Structure formats: structure tokens, C-alpha cells
Amino acid sequence: MSRGLFITLEGVDGAGKSTHIDWMAERFRARGRVVRCTREPGGTPLGERLRALLLNEAMHPDTEALLMFAARREHLVRVIEPALAAGEVVISDRFTDASFAYQCGGRGLPEARLEVLESWVQGALQPDLTLLFDVDHEIAQARRDAVRDPDRFEREDPQFHARVRAAYLRRAERFPERIRRVDANQPVEAVRRQIETLIAPWL
Ligand code: TMP
């Protein structure tokens, strides 16, 4: 079966990952690949409605995790899996690593509970490559402080974001082949050079 390429971008709020998506997509398009840029939570009409709830409504951490994975199931079935089956490059701004970082690391849910959802929703499917944009607490906090209308996650205290970052770094240690750390403290051009090196084998 022809299988495209699945790349995900991760990091704490304020890590600056979203700045690089269009540029990455162009790198693949320049090589003749069809690229689909998408995001989580979201990526489908229903997923975007769930996103609005997730980012704005107070809810129990279990509800939050379940809605994240409900949006993900819809995203996989309607967007990601068909695109991969057609041989496309899918670049998603966040995926399941975010659930382990935010809902387990940030909110304290047990990982075993999310592993059940992970296997239900995505089976064995994992990204081919995950870029973890890692940035010092102070820089990320300054960027979050500058957001004019912060969402429920951006409003969380620095300890929450420190737990999220630590959980991301633990996952990168656990899956070193897939999750590659990008030092996002550097200027945009230097960050791009790191990305270029990491995606080169896939171009
Ligand atoms: P964004 O700001 O990168 O668009 O992501 C929206 C927020 O959703 C972000 O603060 C992280 C959060 N999130 C989770 O808590 N769990 C998840 O599984 C995903 C995909 C996002």
C-alpha cells in the first residue's frame, strides 16, 4: 500500500512551532509532494467545533481527554488516513503526544488511561517524525503573556506549562527515533536550519 508521510509538530504554548509549518510544506512541495497542513484539536468541521469547546469551556480533565481523542478520531478517518493512503505528506500542528504532555503531564491523568484511547483511536498508526519545539520557560511565558485573548491552556500557570514541557521531554527520551528536539530558543533562521537537517532524510 502506498503510504505518505506523517509529520507532527509539538511543544508548549509559546514554543513558536506554528511559524514553521508553511515553510516546511513548501520544502516538500518543491520536491513535487502533495502536502496537507492541518491541526489538532481541529482539522475537520466537527473537530473545529470541539476545539472551540476545548479551548474555552471549563471541563473535567477526563472530559477534556475524551474530547481531544474524539476530535482526533474524526481527523484520522476523514483527513489523515485518506491523505496518507493517497501518498500525501501530512503535517499536523499537534497530535497524540500533546495529549500525553497536557492531559497527563499538565492535568495529571494516568498514562495508562490515555494509552487505551490511543490504541482505540489510532491503532498502530504513529507519526513518522515529530519535531518537538523546546524553548526556555521564560521565553515561552513571555510569548503567552503577549497573547491578547489567551485560551484556557495559555492562561494556565507557569507550573502547569513546566509539567507539560517535562512530559514532552520524557516522551522524546522514550521515543528517540521518532521525536526529535528542536532548540527553539534560537532565531527563526537558525531554527529553520535545524528543521532542514531533521527533515532532509524525508525530502
Ligand atoms: P494550539 O495552541 O497549538 O493550537 O493548541 C491548542 C491547545 O490545545 C494547546 O494549548 C494544547 C492543547 N492540546 C491538548 O491539551 N491536548 C491535545 O491532545 C492537543 C492536540 C492539544
Image (cartoon, grey):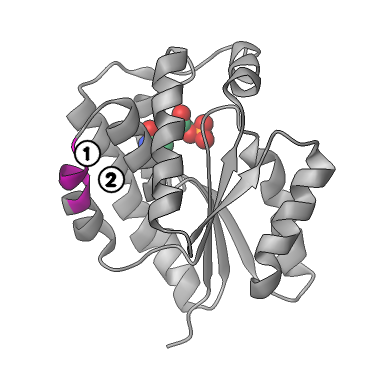
On the question of residue 51 being in view, the answer is: no
Residue 6 placement (x, y as % from top left):
51, 65
Splitting the image into four quadrants, where does ligand 1 fall? top left
Predominant SS of the magenta segment: helix
The reply to whether discs 2 and 1 touch (Cβ–Cβ < 8 Å) is yes
Residue 28 placement (x, y as % from top left):
71, 67
| Disc 2: residue Cβ within 8 A of ligand 1's nearest atom | yes
Work out whether 6 lies above or below 174.
below
Which residue is pictured at 53% across the width and 38% down the height? 11
Local secondary structure at mark 1: helix
Residue 98 placement (x, y as % from top left):
40, 41
The boundaries of the magenta stretch are 110-115
Q: Which residue is mark 2?
A: 69
Does residue 147 appear to the left or right of 191 in the view shown? left
Numbered badge on residue 66: 1
Which residue is pictured at 60% across the width and 23% down the height? 140
Which residue is pictured at 63% across the width and 47% down the height? 182
Mark 2 neighbour density, 10 Å: few (under 14) some (14–19) many (20 or more) = many
Does residue 125 appear to the left or right of 23 in the view shown? left
Work out whether 160 lies above or below 19.
above
In what quadrant of the picture does the N terminus appear?
bottom left
149 in the magenta segment: no
- How far apart are the alpha carbons under marks 2 and 1? 5 Å
Numbered badge on residue 43: none
Q: Nearer the viewer, residue 57 or 18?
A: 18
Looking at the rendered structure, the kind of residue marked 2 is Phe
In what quadrant of the picture does the C terminus appear?
bottom right
Looking at the rendered structure, the kind of residue marked 1 is Leu
